[in-house]
Image (cartoon, rainbow, N blue to C red):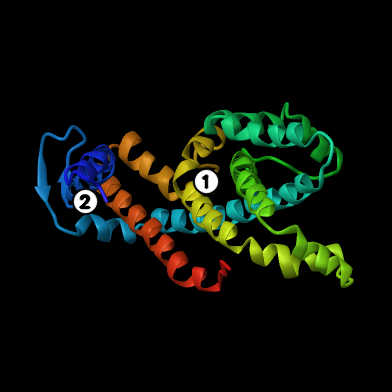
Amino acid sequence: MFPNKVLPYLLLAPQLAITLVFFYWPASQALYQSMLREDPFGLNSSFVWFDNFERVLSDPSYLNSIKVTAVFSMATAFVAMSTALLLAVMADRVVRGRGLYRTLLIWPYAVAPAIAGMLWLFLFNPSIGSLAYGLRWLGIAWDPLLNGTDAMILVVAAASWKQISYNFLFFVAGLQAIPRTLIEAAAIDGAGPAKRFWTIVFPLLAPTTFFLLVINTTYAFIDTFGIIHAVTGGGPGKATETLVYKLYNDGFVNLILGDSAAQSVILMIIVIALAVFQFRFVEKRVHYG
């Protein structure tokens, strides 16, 4: 108990102020602007209620961006989490040089998203990329500048590589928290490495996996803008134009203020709904004990 009744509110005040200024106030502004029709300079505006939402949701290009985002987010989350789990299991078995191994795996998280995208773009550039040259040598036609599937693979690879380090840290921490006696007892009973992993280790990693599922989904929806902007610019032919990138195009490039505000509200609702769905339904399959 606090001796001073005012002290708890004073301690919470900075965090509440940050949340109010950087979340609730911008969210309320976006909700208000989503119901306005404005000129590009914001000089004239009229209240149109939900007309912007109707126009956005009936736009074929916006519906296409929803499909692109769904494919991109699922692929990114799966690749980033599965690769990080594999690397964490391997790191957990390393005896010599464990610290160096983990440090090298953590480094990519310090790279800015745009820089990460440019690194992968140079590697897979159809003209000068070393990995693209290897693919051509194997007889694989690779051109992310013209082929939408190749472009999607490239941005998924870049986004996953950027997030693997974050997932790796949590999986390593989760593996270290698992009692070794359980694994040793299963080994004595004759269970092989694969069976021990799927019947003991992976179920005990369920809380960590669930947490990372929420984080990776949010990351793929919002935080991958820099990668897509640097690598493909939403192309070719809008094949990699996710919801957040279409919002940028309509709001900051084409200056369609009302529609872009409506898109931001829709994106916020989708992310919140996904988080609620994961906590309400996916978490029921997670065992913490």
For the residues bearing labels 1 and 2, Cβ distance under 8 angstroms: no
Few, some or many residues within 10 Å of mark 1 (<14, 14–19, 20+) = few
Give residue 95's quadrant in the image: top right
Location of the C terminus by quadrant is bottom right
**How far apart are the two marked residues, 1 and 2, measured between alpha carbons?**
30 Å
Does residue 221 appear in this view?
Answer: yes
Disc 1 element: loop
Q: How far across and how far down the image is residue 48, in percent?
A: 13, 55
Compare residues 183 and 150 and report the one nearer the observer: 183
Q: Residue at x 82, y 69 (%)?
A: 186
Percent coordinates x, y for residue 69 in the rendering: 49, 54
* Outermost residue, front side: 3
Query: Residue 243: x and y, percent?
Result: 42, 50
| Circle 2 residue | 31
Residue nearer the viewer, 198 or 162: 198
Which residue has dot 1 on it? 237
- Residue type, numbered disc 1: Gly
Amino acid tagged 2: Leu
Residue at left offset 41%, top offset 53%: 61
Is residue 139 shown left or right of residue 199? right
